[in-house]
Amino acid sequence: MKLSKRMQAVAAMVSPGNVLADIGTDHGYVPIALVQEHVIPRAIAMDINEGPLERATAHIREYHLESLIETRRSNGVEMLREGEADSILIAGMGGELIIGILTAGEAVCKKARELILQPQSEIDEVRKYLRSNQYKIVDEDMVYEDGKYYPMMHVVPEEDTFWSNKDPHTIEVCEMYGPILLKNGNPVLRKFLVWQHKMLMQILTQLNEQVSSEKIERRIEEVKHQLWCNESAYSILGAIKDAGI
């Protein structure tokens, strides 16, 4: 089973030997690849829609892994029992949806050993939720594929003391770009920061050329704040290198 670059990076975060629950499994490619490569002993592939489950089931049969990968129709982790999976993977969804799954399934998620999350949007809100709900980000990665940047995080259900002595601006920038991505000076994040800065400068130029209004002025201030966070990322990167996270 050949995975995309994004899914390879997500799969690499699953700890060997763990039982995996893949939420929103779609084609079932990640559990198939991990079982096939003997990284994990078995998996549960779950999706809310019947179509993706049928596709996943067909692929699982194609690789003769029916005895090792079970499929279940489930809204989030609704059909997963507490302690049934060591690793819970939630990838390829919007951040708001991921937060909803974590909130509705808190009892199940807190019993897992690890969560691997790859939100497609509202990434800062996901990190804020994790910080506020006793989750610790222990690893992060970011890949660039098909013209898009994909951050992902490896999370464990325990309090993260890293945040306790950080000022509000540092917290905001870390939630926006990822504390461990910043700490490690992730090369893909660096490229993203350059790309984002250029994009924000273009937006600011366009806004300044428009007829002034309350809405335009408000948007200008928003973009300036985003630029400030973008430019702060480099100094914060150096400041947290020895933070022990």
Image (cartoon, rainbow, N blue to C red):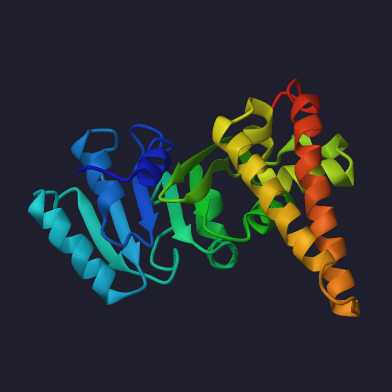
Q: Residue at left 63%, top 26%?
A: 184
| Residue depicted at x 38% and y 67% | 79
Q: In the image, 75: left or right of 135? A: left
Q: Is residue 218 above or below residue 222?
A: below
Does 69 sit left or right of 111 as displayed?
left
Outermost residue, front direction?
209
Query: Residue 232 appears at what percent x and percent y?
Result: 81, 39
Tell me where residue 46 sits by quadrant.
Answer: bottom left
Residue 138 visible in this rendered orientation of the protein: no
Where residue 48 appears, as percent x and y from the top left, is: 37, 72
In the image, taking residue 161 as reference, residue 16 lies left or right, namely left
Residue drawn where x is 55% and y is 36% of the image? 188
Position of residue 47 measured from the top left corner of the image (x, y, whole percent): 34, 67
Q: Position of residue 182 (x, y in %)?
A: 68, 33
The quadrant of the image that shows the C terminus is top right
**Can residue 114 be seen in the rendering of this structure?**
yes
Q: Residue at x 44, y 68 (%)?
A: 78
Toward the top, the furthest residue is 242
Image label count: 0
Q: Quadrant of residue 37?
A: top left
- Name the one closer to the observer, 130 or 171: 171
Looking at the image, is 64 positioned above or below residue 8?
below
Q: Quadrant of the N terminus?
A: top left
